[in-house]
Image (cartoon, rainbow, N blue to C red):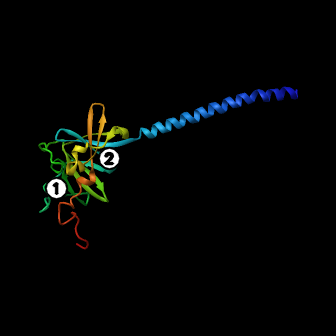
Amino acid sequence: MPRGKKGGSSRRSPDSTDSLHSLRDVLMSQHDERKEEEEEEQLQLLTFMLSGEEYALNIMDIKEIIRPKEATEVPRTPEYILGILSLRGTIIPIFDVNIRLGLKGGEPGSQNRIVVVKWREHLYGLLVDSVVQVLDIPIGMIEPPPEILGGVEGDFLRGVGKMDDRLIILLNLGRILDVEEEEASGSLELPAGT
């Protein structure tokens, strides 16, 4: 009897070697799957239309989307700043993104939206022609903007996303909102104590 048990245990050792190999294979395949998932990391974008082309911003920068409201004009601001409006008690500047990018804007219509974004702890409104969708795009499908678009115009772009037959232009939000270079007065904030 003890011999049978010994023989039985010696028979199990090849099985345990096989199970080690199969466990190693499972672990390796899980590692490969994780690696593929990391390679296929997705970026979530809000896409919108400007002058007939599709543009996008990172969804993490978006606070909400509202219908356009009448903005109060502010003297001596660039023409792409339409004015300010109160959003639940917070005063936000409204940028016309078509004008900011030097595009031929469409006529105001029922599809226009203000995309409210948060940048450096402040809220801003971006007037766009229409909002299209929220889109997940693999980071590998995003390319840097072509070098020929250098200079100021190129600074507005973060990259170009390719999805099927669509080209989606990713905007550089910080550059769009950067008014300090163009205004001696700096930001649109009121001085402390007023």
| View extreme (right): residue | 1
Picture coordinates of residue 63, whole percent (x, y): 31, 51
- State the quadrant of the N terminus: top right
**Position above or below: 6 against 177:** above
Amino acid type indicated by mark 1: Ile
Give yes or no for contact between labels 2 and 1 (Cβ–Cβ under 8 Å).
Answer: no
* Labels 2 and 1: the sequence-earlier one: 2
**CA neighbours of label 1 inside 10 A, class few (<14), some (14 to 19), many (20+):** many
Residue matched to label 1: 81
| View extreme (bottom): residue | 193
Mark linked to residue 180: none
Residue toward you, 16 or 192: 16
Q: Residue at x 27, y 31 (%)?
A: 165
Picture coordinates of residue 72, whole percent (x, y): 14, 58
Q: Is residue 61 left or right of residue 94?
A: right
Q: Secondary structure at mark 1?
A: strand
Can you tell which quarter of the image residue 135 is in? top left
Residue matched to label 2: 58
Residue toward you, 82 or 56: 56
Picture coordinates of residue 158, whole percent (x, y): 29, 47
Q: Residue at x 32, y 43 (%)?
A: 45
Q: Secondary structure at mark 2?
A: strand
Picture coordinates of residue 171, whole percent (x, y): 26, 47
Can you tell which quarter of the image residue 92 is in? bottom left
Q: Residue at x 34, y 49 (%)?
A: 60
Marks 2 and 1 sit apart, C-alpha to C-alpha, by 22 Å
| View extreme (front): residue | 148
**Position above or below: 18 against 134:** above
Amino acid type indicated by mark 2: Asn
